Amino acid sequence: MSGGRESPDAAPGVPDVPIPEWAGLCARCMQARLIVSDRGSMFVLCEAARTDPSLDRYPRLPILRCHGFTARRPEA
């Protein structure tokens, strides 16, 4: 990974690794965090599920509609 720089679409704490577009809304949601296992498997963690029990912590992808969606801010 390159020097800790994070891209605007990168998951928090995962430098230069954007959430793939095939994840649907999660790819553009600031509540989503990409988890990469030691074996290279990728999962999307929904941080909004911590406070909203109606949301799945690890949702089945792609997500096309979500009441917990919060758009990421575009890069200035």
Image: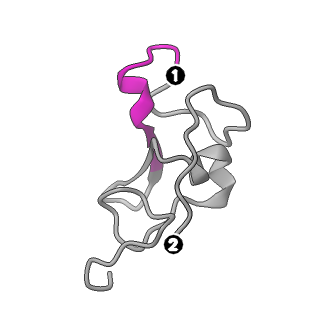
Is residue 33 found left or right of 75 in the rendered image?
A: left
Image position, residue 69 (x, y; %) = 58, 36
Q: Secondary structure at mark 2?
A: loop
> In this picture, is 43 found above or below 64?
below
Residue 22 in the magenta stretch? The answer is: no
> In percent of the image, x 63 and y 40: which residue is there?
61
- Closer to us: 40 or 24: 24
Residue type of the residue flagged with mark 1 = Leu
- Rendered image: mark on residue 76: 2
- Rendered image: mark on residue 40: none
Residue type of the residue flagged with mark 2 = Ala
Query: What is the magenta range?
Result: 43-54
Tag nearer the camera, 1 or 2: 2
Is residue 64 found left or right of 55 in the rendered image?
A: right
Which of the 4 image quadrants contains residue 10? Answer: bottom left
Image position, residue 43 (x, y; %) = 46, 47
Residue 45 in the magenta stretch? The answer is: yes
